[in-house]
Amino acid sequence: MRPVSPCPGHAEVIGLESGFTLVELLLALVVAGVVLAASFGWVWNLGVLARVHDDRAQAGTIAAAAARGIADDVHAAVAVLPPPATHDPSRAVTLLHDHVAAAPEEVTVVWDPARKVVWRNASGTYVADHVTALRVTYVLGDGREADPAEMTPADWPVVSAVLVRLTTGVGSARASRTVLAEVGP
C-alpha cells in the first residue's frame, strides 16, 4: 500500500497493511470450533430423534398393511380350512377363495418367525417383513374363540371369523395390530 497523508501539506504517514493478524485468525478459529462442538450434540440428537420417528412410522405402516392384507384375504374367503401339516396353525391361516371364472383357490397366509416375514401361499407372495409376532385364533359360529391347536375337524366348517394379532418391529419401535375379520363377502 502506498503512503497516505491525512491532510495536504502535512508529513506523510506510512499506512498499515489491511487484513487480519495471525492472533485474530487463531482466535476466530477457536471460537468457531467451540460453537461447532457445542452444536454437534444438538445435531446428533436431532438425527437420533428423526431415526426414532422414522422407525415408529415404518413399524406402524407395516403392521397396518399386514393386518389389512390378511383381513382382505379372510373377507374374500368362502371357507376356512385347516392349515397344511407343515405349518403351525397358530401362525398360519388357510382360506378357500371361490373365483367366478376360475377354479377355487386355497390361500395360506403364514408367518415365518426365523425371517420375520409373513407370506401368502408360502413362500410365494411377500405380505410384510419386520413381523416379530403373529398369533391366529378362530371364532366359531357360536361366538367362541378356538385355539388353533385344539380345533377338531368339525370346527373348521363353522369358523365365522379369524382373529389375528401381530406385532412389527423396526429399530427400537414396535407396533401391534389386532384384526377380527369375518369370513365371506
Image: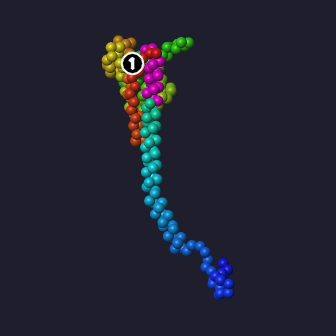
Residue of label 1: 161
**Within 10 angstroms of label 1, few (less than 14), some, or many (20 or more) residues?**
many
Location of residue 175 with respect to 17 vertically, above or below? above
Q: Is residue 19 visible?
A: yes
Location of residue 109 with respect to 116 vertically, above or below? above
Q: State the image quarter where residue 57 is shown.
A: top left
The residue lying toward the viewer, choosing from 100 and 13, is: 13
Q: Residue at x 67, y 80 (%)?
A: 2
Q: State the image quarter where residue 108 is shown.
A: top left
Secondary element at image label 1: strand
Quarter containing the N terminus: bottom right
Q: Report the span colored magenta.
A: 65-79
Q: Is residue 106 visible?
A: no
Q: Residue at x 55, y 74 (%)?
A: 21
Q: Residue at x 44, y 59 (%)?
A: 38
| Position of residue 15 measured from the top left corner of the image (x, y, whole percent) | 62, 80
| Position of residue 65 measured from the top left corner of the image (x, y, whole percent) | 46, 30
